[in-house]
């Protein structure tokens, strides 16, 4: 009886699909062949590709690409949850952003996705006690992507930040799983106190463009915050709030507002 091979290829449907899409992209647009090969096809794993993209984007005269790559590689080796969260983020962007038609788009082109993955490396550094390096990553993410996330903030998986311009997430903020937010969102504090001073965003919350959530308040799961709102008080689960200051104006409209991305009050 022939011996069964003990070497099996790891099952990674997200990475396999990105590879298939990358090969088709090179066929369709040969001028992007160098970018696609260096960013995707050259790498054996999704984590390797993420490390390459993070290093390429965040390196500067102050920190070489090789050094940034080594930091990112170390993070992914030490904490497999970083890669798992990134895969969930890719799927979230693909499912929720109507402009996203392939899994490879967030990895190659979307600064919201790239900024969140770089933040995750900075958060790993922060948890390792390497706080100055974590602050350096925060600085570079802000400079390159226009997204300012404190490395101590805690962010779940399945995150979609659409357009991702002028996003601010403070030090003690907590963002749950499957949260969607649009550009110019602030999760900020309300004073100079050095304690737990930032919002706690529940799972499945949808935060509209230009919304500001301020202070150590809780936003209940599967709620909606309308664009341009200023939220200063707790929001119960499954509600819609709007206004300055924000008030409850109705139910969330559906069971998963962060997935449907329906931001029209009263349209559900």
Image: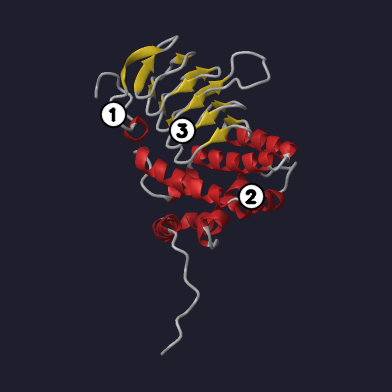
Element carrying mark 1: loop
The residue singled out by tag 2 in the image is 75
User: Disc 1 to disc 2, how far (Cα)?
Assistant: 37 Å
| Tag of residue 123 | none
Residue 260 drawn at (x, y percent): 31, 33
Q: Residue furthest top?
A: 245
| Position of 205 relative to 4 (above/below) | above
Q: Are marks 1 and 2 in contact (CB under 8 Å)?
A: no
Residue 87 drawn at (x, y percent): 46, 49
Q: Residue at x 44, y 9 (%)?
A: 244
Select label 2 or label 3 by which is in front. 2
User: Disc 2 to disc 3, how far (Cα)?
Assistant: 26 Å
Q: Are marks 2 and 3 in contact (CB under 8 Å)?
A: no
| Precedes in sequence: disc 1 or disc 3 | 3
The residue singled out by tag 1 in the image is 254
Quadrant where the image shows the C terminus: top left
Select label 1 or label 3 by which is in front. 1
Dot 1 alpha-carbon crowd within 10 angstroms: few under 14, some 14 to 19, many 20 or more: some
Residue 67 drawn at (x, y percent): 72, 50
| Tag of residue 163 | 3
User: Disc 1 to disc 3, how far (Cα)?
Assistant: 24 Å
Residue 54 drawn at (x, y percent): 60, 46
In the image, taking residue 203 as reference, residue 249 lies left or right, namely left
């Amino acid at each position: 009886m022939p011996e069964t091979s003990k070497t099996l290829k790891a099952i990674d449907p997200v990475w396999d699909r990105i590879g298939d899409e990358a090969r088709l992209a090179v066929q369709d647009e040969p001028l992007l062949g160098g970018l696609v090969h260096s960013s995707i096809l050259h790498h054996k794993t999704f984590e390797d590709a993420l490390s390459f993209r993070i290093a390429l984007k965040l390196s500067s005269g102050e920190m070489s690409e090789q050094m940034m790559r080594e930091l990112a590689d170390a993070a992914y080796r030490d904490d497999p949850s970083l890669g798992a969260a990134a895969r969930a983020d890719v799927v979230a962007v693909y499912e929720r952003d109507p402009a996203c038609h392939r899994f490879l788009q967030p990895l190659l082109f979307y600064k919201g996705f790239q900024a969140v993955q770089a933040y995750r490396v900075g958060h790993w550094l922060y948890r390792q006690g390497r706080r100055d390096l974590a602050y350096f990553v925060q600085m570079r993410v802000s400079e390159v992507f226009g997204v300012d996330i404190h490395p101590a903030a805690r962010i779940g998986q399945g995150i979609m930040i659409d357009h991702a311009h002028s996003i601010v997430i403070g030090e003690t903020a907590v963002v749950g799983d499957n949260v969607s937010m649009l550009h110019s969102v602030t999760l900020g504090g309300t004073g100079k106190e050095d304690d737990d001073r930032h919002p706690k965003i529940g799972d499945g919350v949808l935060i509209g463009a230009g919304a500001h959530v301020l202070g150590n308040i809780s936003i209940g799961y599967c709620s909606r915050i309308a664009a341009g709102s200023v939220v200063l008080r707790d929001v119960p689960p499954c509600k819609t709030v709007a206004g300055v200051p924000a008030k409850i104006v109705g139910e969330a409209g559906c069971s998963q507002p962060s997935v449907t991305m329906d931001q029209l009050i009263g349209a559900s």
